[in-house]
Structure formats: C-alpha cells, structure tokens
Amino acid sequence: MPEMTFTVRWPEGAPVGYYSPSLVMHDFLTAGTRYSVGDFVHRSVTALDHATERVRAKFGFACTSAQASAEQIRCDARAFPSDALVEVVAMEPALPEQLSAKASS
C-alpha cells in the first residue's frame, strides 16, 4: 500500500507535514489549493478515515499513524477561525497523471 505525506501552510504561515498510509488523500485534497480551515479539517479527516479503513481491509487492523495525523490536524486547526485559509503546499508522491502533466508543461 503506497504511503504519502502532505504539507500544508496554516494561516500564520507555518508549514506542517502530515502522514497518510494511502494515496486516497488525492481524492480529497489538491496541492496548490487553499481551503477554509473548517473545510480542510473535514476533507483531510474524512480522507484519513478512508485510509485507515483501507489498512484495516488489507491488514486486519486500523492505522494508528493515520488516526494520529487526523488528531494532529484537529488540534492544529483549533488555533484558527474556521473560515481562515490553509493551503495544501505539497502532496508526495504525486499521482502518475499529475507527474505526466508537469513533464509536458
């Protein structure tokens, strides 16, 4: 199962990296996009829940690292109003179609 990290820039400017055991994060977030803090928390926690369930389906147990990332995101978000903007700076690895789009531009 491919793992990934995603880096966000919170409203005060600090970049923070988070872990996901699955590329499913690409279904919920897009690098270079800004989301309200409330929307980002909803999208990222939902994606991490999906990632945890993928691990459970494959290995028979939940991914505690994904659960820890979700909890850290909730905790980090508490410092900001829900309508403030957070930017997804990077998602590694990128999806194959994103890599080919970058190569052709």
Image (spheres, grey):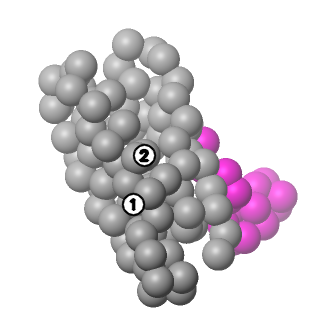
Residue placed furthest toward the right: 103
Q: Residue at x 44, y 57 (%)?
A: 64
On screen, residue 21 versus residue 48, left or right, reads: right
Whether the residues at callouts 2 and 1 have beta carbons within 8 Å, the answer is yes
Task: Based on the picture, tell me whether residue 79 belongs to the magenta stretch.
Answer: no
Residue for badge 2: 69
Residue placed furthest toward the front: 61
Q: Pick the residue in front: 101 or 26.
A: 26
Q: Residue at x 64, y 62 (%)?
A: 3
- Counting from the top left corner in percent of width and height, residue 76 is at 32, 28
Rendering quarter of residue 78: top left
Vertically, is 19 above or below 46? above
The answer to whether residue 8 of the structure is visible from this angle is yes
- Counting from the top left corner in percent of width and height, residue 6 is at 55, 45
Residue for badge 1: 48
* Magenta stretch, residue numbers: 90-105
Q: CA distance from mark 2 to mark 1?
A: 8 Å
Badge 2: how crowded within 10 Å, few (<14), some, or many (20+)?
some
Quarter of the picture holding the C terminus = bottom right
Amino acid residing under circle 2: Ser
Q: Residue at x 60, y 42 (%)?
A: 90
Q: Which sits earlier in the primary sequence, circle 2 or circle 1? A: 1
Q: Secondary structure at mark 2?
A: helix
Vertically, is 5 above or below 1? above
Q: Pick the residue in front: 98 or 64.
A: 64
Vertically, is 80 above or below 49? above
On screen, residue 57 versus residue 90, left or right, reads: left
The answer to whether residue 44 of the structure is visible from this angle is no
Quarter of the picture holding the N terminus = bottom right
